[in-house]
Image (cartoon, rainbow, N blue to C red):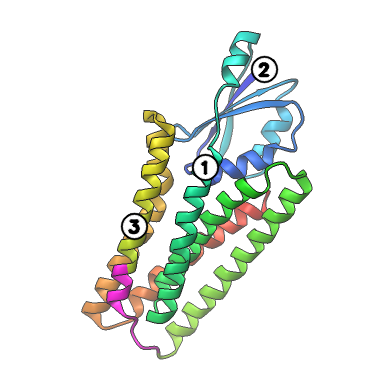
Amino acid sequence: MNKTTYNIDKMDCLSEEQIVRMKLEVVPGIKSLKFEIPQRKLYVMHEGDASPITKAIDSLHFNSSLVSTRSINDEEALLFCQTDGLERKLLWQVLAINFFFFLVEIISGFISGSMGLIADSLDMLADSIIYGLALFVVGKALFQKRKIAKISGYLQMLLAIAGFVEVARRFLGYEETPNFKTMIIISVLALAGNALTLNLLQKSKNKEAHIKASTICTSTDVITNAGVIVAGILVYFTASNLPDLIIGAIVFVLVGIASYRILKL
């Protein structure tokens, strides 16, 4: 039995962990995986050569590199396999929070006319899809998992493109300024939702390393929430929809990048 260590620089969130897991399912000989997201490290216990594993990870373009490969004894292999992944209960909780705030933000976005809120809602949807995939494809055949992942990836990509086109249309034409109060209030609530998710992940992991991982995982969402709040304040002071369009365009690009990663599976 062998243990191979990888650095994966762009694996900074639980969603990237799920993408790596799905990618490696097709590789024969893998017995167990252990992730250390704060350190951007992946440990793979496997039989045979590590080349197929390295090739699969490199195809994700997460800026990965092989650190070391060594043989391990049965005792170390048993200890390695005791590492648990996310519990189904936790996945359900995180999925419910993300999907709830997706609905809240997208409805509020259309009512208030805010592209920032609509874009942020799609970011929540992207996270929901990742956690949903981890739940609903358990026990299914590999081709079914990939089919579901492809469908979700194309859906996200289409939504991101449609959103970006709408931002461009509003930028070139005349549109009323969005309701800045709704932008700020809903973004603060979404920020609270991310804090709740972080709290659940911290309780589940109950280790300092995993607490750091959870902090890293939610950092992008928190920054996005803060961006929409700032955009709402700027809309108030400038009486212009430009700040809302800028933050919306940025988030739509991030959603597009996330969908591209899923389509690469």
Magenta stretch holds residue 179: yes
Q: Please name which of the two marks, 1 or 3, marks the residue nearer to the observer.
A: 1
Which residue occupies the foreground of this view, 164 or 67?
Answer: 164
Q: Earlier in the sequence, mark 1 or mark 2?
A: 2
Q: Secondary structure at mark 2?
A: strand
Residue 86 position, x and y percent, is 53, 37
Q: Which mark is residue 191?
A: 3
Q: Amino acid at mark 1?
A: Lys
Labelled pair 1, 2 in contact (Cβ < 8 Å): no
Query: Is residue 48 rendered to the left or right of residue 259?
Result: right
Query: Is residue 208 rendered to the left or right of residue 139?
Result: left
Q: Seen from this angle, which residue lies furthest front?
A: 89
Q: Amino acid at mark 3?
A: Leu
- What's the residue at 67%, 54% (across, down)? 149
Q: Please name which of the two marks, 1 or 2, marks the residue nearer to the observer.
A: 1
Residue hosting label 2: 2
* 75 over 19 or under it: above or below: above
Which residue occupies the foreground of this view, 114 or 141?
Answer: 141
Q: Which mark is residue 89?
A: 1
Residue 147 position, x and y percent, is 74, 54
Query: In the image, which residues are magenta?
Result: 175-185
Q: Amino acid at mark 2?
A: Asn
Task: Evaluate whether residue 181 shows in this view.
Answer: yes
Density class for disc 1 (Cα within 10 Å; few <14, some 14-19, many ≥20) is few
Q: Spatial distance from mark 1 to mark 3, Cα to Cα?
A: 22 Å
Q: Spatial distance from mark 1 to mark 2, Cα to Cα?
A: 32 Å
Q: Earlier in the sequence, mark 1 or mark 3?
A: 1
